[in-house]
Structure formats: C-alpha cells, structure tokens
Amino acid sequence: MACIVEETERSDESNETQIALLSGVPDDISKSCLARVPREYHMAMKCVSRRWRDFVCSDELCDYRNKFNLGESWIYALCRDISGGVFLHMLNPFSSRRSWKRIHEYPYIPMREGMGFAALGKRLFVLGGCGWLEDATDEVYCYDAAMNTWCDVVPPLSTKRCYFASETLDGKIMAIGGLGLNPNAKRTWDIYDPLTRTCKSCSDVNIVPEIEDSFVMDGRIYIRGGGGGSSSAVYSASSGIWERMDDDMASGWRGPAVVVADDLYVLDQTFGATLTMWCKETRMWIRIGKLSQLVMKQPCRLVSVGNSIFVIGKDCSTVVIDVENVRKTTMNGVMVCSSIPKTWDDDIDVISCKSVAI
C-alpha cells in the first residue's frame, strides 16, 4: 500500500511539472511576467500551485529580477531580546505602511554573542559566536528569504570564532579576525563558499584585532579595530593580502559605515549622531548633518537601500536619510528625515543589519 501511495505522489508531481505556469503561454514568457510581480505578493503567489511556489523560491527568479533591475531590497535585522534569544526582524521599505515584522521561524541558536551576519544572494548567514557556557563555535545557519525557511549549512567555518567581521566579496563570505580557541584566530580569516560548500582558512599579520566595524567598497573589504586610524586595514581580492588603510580615510571612520552609490558614509556617535561622507576627490571627510535623538536610540547600525540610508537603533527605531536631498533639507545643522517607529513593547538590541534583494 505504501508503494502505491508513493507512486501516486510521484505521478502527481510529474504531472504538475508538465502543467504550464500560465495556461496557453510558453514558460519563458510566463516567467518574465511573473518576475515582474512586486515582492510583497510573492507569498500569495506560492499558494497558487507547486510550480509557482518552486519558481518564486528559486535562484532563477532572484537572478532575473536583479539582472533587469526589478529586485526589491528588504532589510533584515539580527536582534537579541532581554532574555538573550536571537531572532530576525524584517522591514519592507517599499510598503505604504512601513513597519518592522518579526520572523518567528528561526533555528535553536543558543544565547550566543559575537556572531557574524552576512547576506549573499537571497540568503542570510549567521556564523560562529560564543556564550557564557559555550566556547567559540564554527556553526553556520542559513535563512532563505524567498522560501522563508532556516537550515543548517555544511561545512562549518574552518576556524571557531566570535566577535569577528563578516562581509561578502566575489560571491563568497569572509569571516575575519575575532576571538577563538586558537590564539592566532585574530590574525586569520575564512573564505566561505556556499556554492561549492568549501571553506578555506588564511592568515595575515595585518589583520587588526578587536574589529568593531567593516564595509565593502570598490571590490575591497575595509575593517576597523578599536585602536583608531592606526588599527584599520583593507583587503583586495586581486592581491589576496591585507594592507594598512590610508590614514586620511581612516581618521574619520569613527562609527558604523555604509556605502551608497560608491560613496562612503559614517555615523559618528561620539557626541550625538553626526553623518559624514568621504570625498574621494579631495580626500577629506565632509560633514552632512546631525540626527535628532528624539526618533531613534543609540547605538545604531546602518544599511543602504537605493539612495537611502536606514539608521537602525535600539528596539529597531529607524530613521531614513535620502542622501540625494539631505543637504537641501537640513535645518540649523539637523537633518530632516522620515522615521519608522517600533511597534512592540519589548526591549531588543540590534546586532547587525543586512539587505536582501529579490
């Protein structure tokens, strides 16, 4: 009887794969039409049929939308609540009613700190970390934003580490520096390739300790330690080595950084919150303006979507800065921005933020 049921299920699946996505329309044209449906309707599209669901969740749809500039970037914040639990919040910046929503389905991640957070394609990766009763780990979890599911990733990191930088470059995830069971972990970095499921460990004495922030610009990874300008380094994929960062550029990197349209912005939180921009032509830092402390709580994280910077503070209190118009809308040195208030009463800390374009 079990064999008959199994054969019937396989037959149903085979028959469904032969059904056109849109009746009477070739699949290549159907896919082009479905790819133009706004992302907020993808959840409903997955309920139409198994073929629609598989296409909506596929890398093919994601690649097509991004290739033809149809991709929509949603923001994901890795957060920790007062009990120490780790989870994700999601924001659709294109919605008419912008608000943060908690993603309830997440794996059992112990109450860890110092985890890495990276985005690659339509997937988010949570890497490493440690806890009060747990040493640094090499575990990797993956969240597929299109499928809205979590899964464990094999293989793990080459090096067990926590409190490290994580960035993506050339389709690979870099887990850089930090602390680990190996005392030399702070001078190493792992190159993690989810496509080939391989992880390679490398070392370089120029990697700075106690990394506080990182960003990617012009095909290079920049990292900043806690020692100011002298504790910054840059990695070039072409050379495969780390070098000391330019002093002029490093001197103004005093807070979280984000790249918008190839321009680097930094939120200096030393006294209040001041946004500055690195000018490549003059090699100087330009002051843009200050943020009001009434609409968001420090410390803040930065993420960019299009020409806007999303400043995400404690409890996911959010300020949106339009970098194209911000200088025109500054009053008495304070930037005029839109804000997205939190919609819950719990206290949460934002560990890191990334955007995923689908």
Image (cartoon, rainbow, N blue to C red):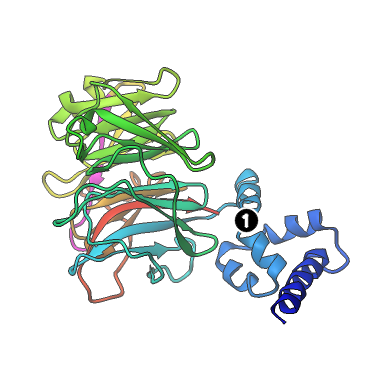
Q: Position of residue 15 (x, y in %)?
A: 81, 69
| Magenta region, main secondary structure | strand
Q: Is label 1 in a helix, a strand or a loop? A: loop
Determine the image quadrant of residue 101.
bottom left
Which residue in the structure is indicated by mark 1? 58
Q: Is residue 201 left or right of residue 58?
A: left
Residue drawn at (43%, 47%), measured in percent from left and top? 119
Against 249, residue 42 (above or below) is below
| Residue 326 included in the magenta stretch of the image | no
Residue drawn at (49%, 59%), measured in percent from left and top? 145
Tell me, yes or no, if residue 85 can be seen here. yes
User: Number of marks in the image?
Assistant: 1
Nearest to the observer: residue 321 or residue 142: 142
Tell me, yes or no, if residue 258 can be seen here. no
The three-letter amino acid code for the residue at tag 1 is: Ser
Q: Position of residue 206 (x, y in %)?
A: 24, 21
Q: Position of residue 227 (x, y in %)?
A: 12, 31
Determine the image quadrant of residue 40.
bottom right
Residue drawn at (23%, 76%), measured in percent from left and top? 345
Range of residues picked out in magenta = 284-294
Residue drawn at (27%, 32%), measured in percent from left and top? 223
Q: Position of residue 266 (x, y in %)?
A: 27, 40
| Residue 287 included in the magenta stretch of the image | yes
Determine the image quadrant of residue 270.
top left
